Image (cartoon, rainbow, N blue to C red):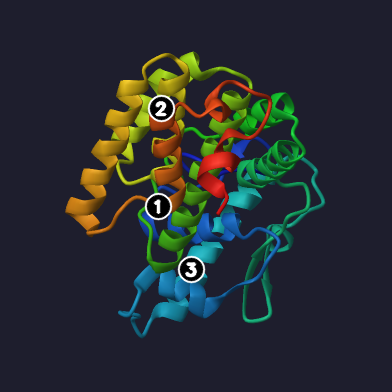
Amino acid sequence: MEIKVLGPLEVRENGVSVAPSAGKPRQVLALLALRAGHVVPVPTLMDEIWGDRIPQSAVTTLQTYILQLRRKLSAAHAGTGSGRSSKEILATAYGGYLLTREGTDSDAAEFERLAARGSAALEQGDARAAATLLARALGLWRGPALVDVQPGNILGLEVQGLEEARMQVLSQRIEADLRLGRHAVLLRELRVLVAQHPLQETLCGQFMLALYRAGSAWRALEAYQRLRRTLSDELGIEPSPQLKRLHQAMLTGDPALTPEPVSLMESFLMTG
């Protein structure tokens, strides 16, 4: 089974799409796909579909959705001679339902695997390998996670977690590129990201560093002041001590800001 959740929902069995078009069955499949290999309890599925307005017919309706999904799975195996039944692929177990992980190819699982390898490479000082692995992880995304599924309480949290992981990996990939001296190439990307995430201090710090290294120290200082005003106006807070140290280092022309094969963000944004 091929599962894609990093963008529009795609679930294929034997190359045949088994994703329903109706909203609520689509929610059920999306949640089962995200948690493939793990039992999703019936109350969790009900909470996802109906929230705090669970109808009296909820159990029967949920069973109907599961039956519809199993029919799609059976149709995908029709004429193939496959020994797997739809009830084996989408099993009833322990008060819930489980989408088997056997033979499953999930973009979310691959993203997690590549992200972990890239993060480890960055920690070990191998910026080139980290940049490659993290870029491959980000390349799996085809848009916002589950962009064509209307999320309920549970999926909403799952999507938020995926998007937060994406931003973390993006920040790490930029850090790796900065270590490799690619500051000039990063400027356009960072300019857009900072505009999209005006309260994100790590991105702002990376943008400041790329500007400083590209010979635009005054623009880097301007970016800091812009963030400082935004944080004050919207949240009533000051920039973090880490970002303040980076700002001060730029004011004094600290040699540590010059291109070196060391962690730039560790020096100014991540250490106390």
**Location of residue 127 with respect to 30 vertically, above or below:** above
90 or 182, which lies in front? Answer: 182
Pointer 3 with pointer 2, Cβ within 8 A = no
Sequence-earlier tag: 3 or 1: 3
Q: Which quadrant would the N terminus be assigned to in this image?
A: top right
Q: Which mark, residue 64? A: 3
Quadrant hosting residue 250: top left
266 or 202, which lies in front? Answer: 266
Which residue, as the protein is rendered here, is positioned at the far front? Answer: 252
Quadrant hosting residue 120: top right
Q: Which residue is mark 1?
A: 240
Q: Position of residue 259 (x, y in %)?
A: 59, 20
- Nearer the viewer's eye, disc 3 or disc 2? 2
**Gap between marks 3 and 1 measured at Cα:** 52 Å
Instruction: Residue type at mark 3: give it.
Output: Thr
Q: Residue at x 62, y 26 (%)?
A: 179
Instruction: Residue type at mark 2: give it.
Output: Leu
